[in-house]
Amino acid sequence: MASKTNRPEAAPEDQSPPLQTIEVLRELHRVKGPIFAGVCAANGWRPGRVMTEAAFLQAVDSFASAPMGGYRGREVQKQC
């Protein structure tokens, strides 16, 4: 007799990474307030956004490793 299951035996399990809010990820990885605010502003994130842990960490790392100086291609003219 066949067993009753909702899922066929050959169907793979859901392997997608879990989604969490950015606030939970901030607490989990102890991201400081100014860094978190900068990442949110740079990426246009609003409170309550859900995403994967890997995407969050990649965004924080790219923000933290970005150059802090301005554009240096042209010298600023001094006004007297």
Image (cartoon, rainbow, N blue to C red):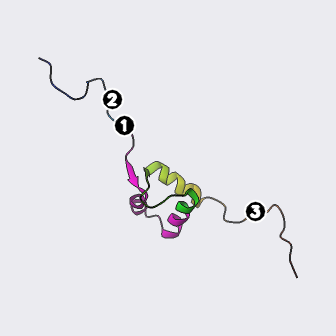
* Cα gap from disc 2 to disc 3, whole angstroms: 50 Å
Label 3 SS: loop
* Cα gap from disc 2 to disc 1, whole angstroms: 8 Å
Instruction: State the quadrant of the C terminus.
Output: bottom right
Question: For residue 12, which numbered disc appears in the image?
Answer: 2
Question: For residue 71, which numbered disc appears in the image?
Answer: 3
Measuring from the top left, give residue 70's x and y in whole percent: 72, 65
Nearest to N terminus: mark 3 or mark 1: 1
Question: For residue 15, which numbered disc appears in the image?
Answer: 1
Nearest to N terminus: mark 2 or mark 3: 2
- The single residue placed furthest to the right in the displayed view is 80
Instruction: State the quadrant of the N terminus.
Output: top left
Amino acid carrying mark 2 in the image = Pro
Label 1 SS: loop
Q: Tag 1: Cα neighbours inside 10 Å, few (<14), some, or many (≥20)?
A: few
Quadrant of the image occupied by residue 17: top left
Measuring from the top left, give residue 52's x and y in whole percent: 43, 49
Residue positioned 48% across, 60% down in the render: 46
